[in-house]
Amino acid sequence: MNNKPSIWSRVALYAIILIIIGVVVSGYYSQKNAKTKNVGISNIVSDVTGGNVSSVDVKDNQVTANLKDGSKEIATIETGATLKDYGITPDKITINVTNTTNSIAWATILSTIIPILLIGGFIWFMFRSAQGNNAKAMSFGKSRAKLVGDTKTSFDDVAGLVEPKQELYEVVDFLRSPAKFKKLGAEIPHGVLLVGPPGTGKTLLAKAVAGEASVPFFSISASEFVEMFVGVGASRVRDLFVKAKRNAPSIIFIDELDAIGRQRGAGMGGGHDEREQTLNQILVEMDGFDTDANVIVMAATNRPDILDAALLRPGRFDRQIAIDLPDKNERAEILKVHVKNKPLAEGVDLEKIAVSTAGFSGADLRNLMNEAAILAARGNSKTVSQLNLDNAIEKVMMGPERKSRLLSAEEKKITSVHESGHAIVSHILPNSDPIHKISVISRGSALGYTWSLPQEDRRLMSKSKFLDDLAAMLAGRAAEEIVFGEITTGASNDMQRATKLARKMVTEFGMSDVLGPQTYGEKEELIFLGREISESKNYSDEVAAKIDKEVASIIDNAYQLAKKTINSNRKILDKISTDLLKKEVIVEDEFLTYFPKEVQRKIKAEEKAL
């Protein structure tokens, strides 16, 4: 809608207010000026004769005598009479005559027109306001999708994701030259669903498709369909598809599809009528009676498990493209993209950063590079150094340093022993990850930390790996018990993680020799209230007791393994914990010097093998 009417309506309102103020002010001053003494004409004649008057003003049949003391007298003479008839002549006193015939005419006209203008302006202003509200009401059911114009993002800006980009290349090629596919009987896919964890680049891929395809690209969030009024979402879906079909071939991108695509009828108390009607309309538009238009629907979600089955069938979202967390090589490529506008110092090794960031998504890596740049700027550096990147990794993974948190000498000693225990067991056991750094400087909620780095990305985890990890988790508590003869609350988080992992080994991964290769328990999602808040038991109380016993056995065995390893290396534990108290931080190369060559892990050999 053009914004000129709204500007003129405001101008008219201000003009009306100013006119009203002017009328009030003029009336006030006219009343103020009218506070003079009313007398008869004979009194004025007497004052003129007595020399008490300095001048006389004549306005029609009204005579005003300006007395020498500053006061005024007003008298009225008969119509048609003059001052000469009363003996007041210009040779006796100064006479000022004002002709008000034109003023009276204008006053009459204004007194008639101004009320009409005020009433008319008020009616016009109310009409414009009502018209604007009606326009808004009429557009309530219109789609809010944004038509993406020329975007500079292309597939070259998306690092890694070779297979997902190949799938989307075919979609773009189909839109550009559909005849090549139709000659072979291939039909255009109705929908493409991008599935993956948060931050893996789903929306970025959609932007790249918009940049690569020379077709209209409509982008909208799924939450923008749903309103408090039932039927509005469905109306917006219809309007969106009408626009897309009018501009076919075209692409519709719906971000966060799970906002409206959840399973219908799921949850307590039934589903939301507005959301379900919106979902039903999308299902009809994607694969209803009218399916001839060349419109492709792209959508992104990180919750494919809760989507309605009707959305995922062929004919709706024909292609489901899985976007996983990047591996080491893809992380290196992503880092190269995010350092384009950042000056790097000499010696910066992005490959090392890629190894150190296992499990990071593309968004995490972008945040990592931004944190490194912030740290460099905070230190007044002109380039981003390797130290800035290492510190940024620690900040992202474990939180910022809290040097202001002062520990007592006893607490600091316990923390150094605790972290040294973690490091020794993790280093000695063959299936645990090598140590990268030990620190007694607080980060986040932790008083200290032991940072281990995997040498490669793992997709499969073995039972022996889990058992060694459990021993490493419990090694801090074991070291406290061996050195001090008592335990503290510092191992609470370690025990929570260990218990959770041990229970998963028994109930989900089938890694129990007693209970065998079987899963126990079925998770039920009450989508209306939240995810994974309920778990039903598909086993008896007798089996539950066996599960508890087996979990306790696994944890106890891991704890005994940790104590045995620490007792065998007690001198090394004392040396590391003593040095850690002085230095506060021990890095990988320095940590390896505490062990005999026959005990040291073959890290260099492993690195060469990789």
Image (cartoon, helix red, strand yellow):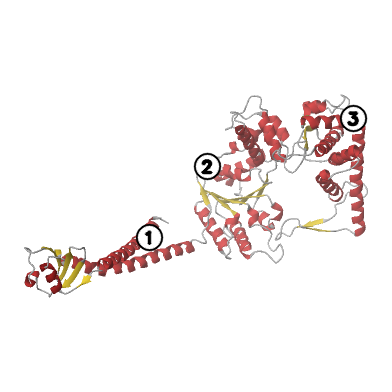
Of the two numbered discs 2 and 3 in the rendering, the one whose residue sits closer to the viewer:
3
Secondary element under disc 2, as helix, strand or loop, is loop
Secondary element under disc 3, as helix, strand or loop, is helix
N-term-proximal mark, 1 vs 2: 1
Residue 423 percent across, percent down from the top left: 83, 34
Q: Is residue 468 above or below residue 137?
A: above
- Is residue 610 left or right of 73 when viewed as pictured? right
Residues packed near mark 1 inside 10 Å, few (<14), some (14 to 19) or many (20 plus): some
Between residue 451 and residue 602, name the one nearer to us: 451
Secondary element under disc 1, as helix, strand or loop, is helix
Q: Which mark is residue 571?
A: 3
N-term-proximal mark, 2 vs 3: 2
- The residue that mark 1 highlights is 9
Q: CA distance from mark 2 to mark 3?
A: 63 Å
Q: Where is residue 153, by image quadrant?
A: top right
- The residue that mark 2 highlights is 151
Q: How many marks?
A: 3
Q: Label 2 sits on what residue type?
A: Thr
Residues packed near mark 3 inside 10 Å, few (<14), some (14 to 19) or many (20 plus): few
Q: CA distance from mark 1 to mark 2?
A: 38 Å
Q: CA distance from mark 1 to mark 3?
A: 87 Å
Q: Label 3 sits on what residue type?
A: Lys
Q: Where is residue 124, by image quadrant?
A: bottom left
Residue 30 visible somewhere in the drawing: yes
Residue at image location 19% in from the left, 65% down from the top = 103
Of the two numbered discs 1 and 2 in the rendering, the one whose residue sits closer to the viewer:
1
